[in-house]
Image (cartoon, rainbow, N blue to C red):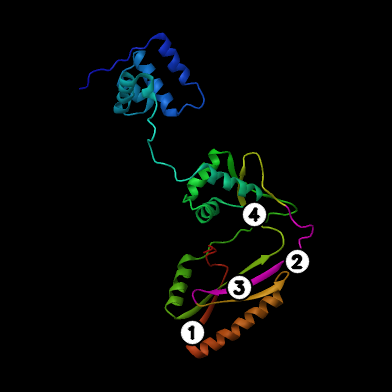
């Protein structure tokens, strides 16, 4: 069983270590070691300190030995300890400049890709998020003038049916197509971006929104992508015309290959690749 360790401090040393715990900018580990030394000086055993600080007894003893061997220098880590960071201050300042000046928004993944492509620095999106948060940046929605946010509730697709259809499509039994609609206009879509804490990214819009260009597409995985374009919304008559066009192609496909065509509305993955 290890012999009890006891540190003896002068009143001046005890007061100096107490002040260490209240000074901003001192690493938390240094403050923790100072507290451990003071607790031991005031009669706390290694086991009691370990239980109170939720540390192992070995860690507590190491802090006491560091003080005995190196005095106040033992509170601090030696230079060169730990993993060297792969980025420089200029890299993060570059990202902050892009966030403030670029007429677009960025999420953490896009910032990570931008660093790798333009600065040759590899940082994961989680690391980018932590670095920006530490420097006072927060992810938040941007402010877009004269733009309303619309939300839609959609039912989850039947996963078993979808998987069966995908299997039949990959086996060549059927021709599976996913139908969906999207649109484009002069105004930027509502999205999230990083910005300085207390500030909000603002993208100035045109005085007039202009007409929306809509696309109604049918995607067959690994085979084809058919679409129709229209200024304004797709109404019932234009929607039926597009389906009639697809019905003619489906009849031709059935006569040539024996494949039936199945069109699933709005159930394919929207992940961008």
Which structural element holds mark 4?
Answer: loop
Residue 37 percent coordinates (x, y)? 36, 19
Which structural element holds mark 1?
Answer: loop
Task: Check the picture and name the quadrant holding the N terminus.
Answer: top left
Residues at marks 3 and 4, CA–CA distance in whole angstroms = 26 Å
Residue corresponding to mark 2: 211
Tell me the tag on residue 104.
4
Q: Is residue 18 above or below residue 162?
A: above
| Residue drawn at (76%, 57%) of the image | 206
Residue 77 percent coordinates (x, y)? 38, 29
Residues at marks 1 and 4, CA–CA distance in whole angstroms = 45 Å
Give the magenta range.
204-222
Residue furthest to the right = 207
Residue 14 percent coordinates (x, y)? 41, 13
Residues at marks 2 and 3, CA–CA distance in whole angstroms = 19 Å
Residue corresponding to mark 3: 217
Mark 1 vs mark 4: in front: 4
User: Which of the two discs, 1 and 4, labels the residue nearer the N terminus?
Assistant: 4
Which structural element holds mark 2?
Answer: loop
Tell me the tag on residue 259.
1
Mark 3 vs mark 4: in front: 4
């Amino acid at each position: 069983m290890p012999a009890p360790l006891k540190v003896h401090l002068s009143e001046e040393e005890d007061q100096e270590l107490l002040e260490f715990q209240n000074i901003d900018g001192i690493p938390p580990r240094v403050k923790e070691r100072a507290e451990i030394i003071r607790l031991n000086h005031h009669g706390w055993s290694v086991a009691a300190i370990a239980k109170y600080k939720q540390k192992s007894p070995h860690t507590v003893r190491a802090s006491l030995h560091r003080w005995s061997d190196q005095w106040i220098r033992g509170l601090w880590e030696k230079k060169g300890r730990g993993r060297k960071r792969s980025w420089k201050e200029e890299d993060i300042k570059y990202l902050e400049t892009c966030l403030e000046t670029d007429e677009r928004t960025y999420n953490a993944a896009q910032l990570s890709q931008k660093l790798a492509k333009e600065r040759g620095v590899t940082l994961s999106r989680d690391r980018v998020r932590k670095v920006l948060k530490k420097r006072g940046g927060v992810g938040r929605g941007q402010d877009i003038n004269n733009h309303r946010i619309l939300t839609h509730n959609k039912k989850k697709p039947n996963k078993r049916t979808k998987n069966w259809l995908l299997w039949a499509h990959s086996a060549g039994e059927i021709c599976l197509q996913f139908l969906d609609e999207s649109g484009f206009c002069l105004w930027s879509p509502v999205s999230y971006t990083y910005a300085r804490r207390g500030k909000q990214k603002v993208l100035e819009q045109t005085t007039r929104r202009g007409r929306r260009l809509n696309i109604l597409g049918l995607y067959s995985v690994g085979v084809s992508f058919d679409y129709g374009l229209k200024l304004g919304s797709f109404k019932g008559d234009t929607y039926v015309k597009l389906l009639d066009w697809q019905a003619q192609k489906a009849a031709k496909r059935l006569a040539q290959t024996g494949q039936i065509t199945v069109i699933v509305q709005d159930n394919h993955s929207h992940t961008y690749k």
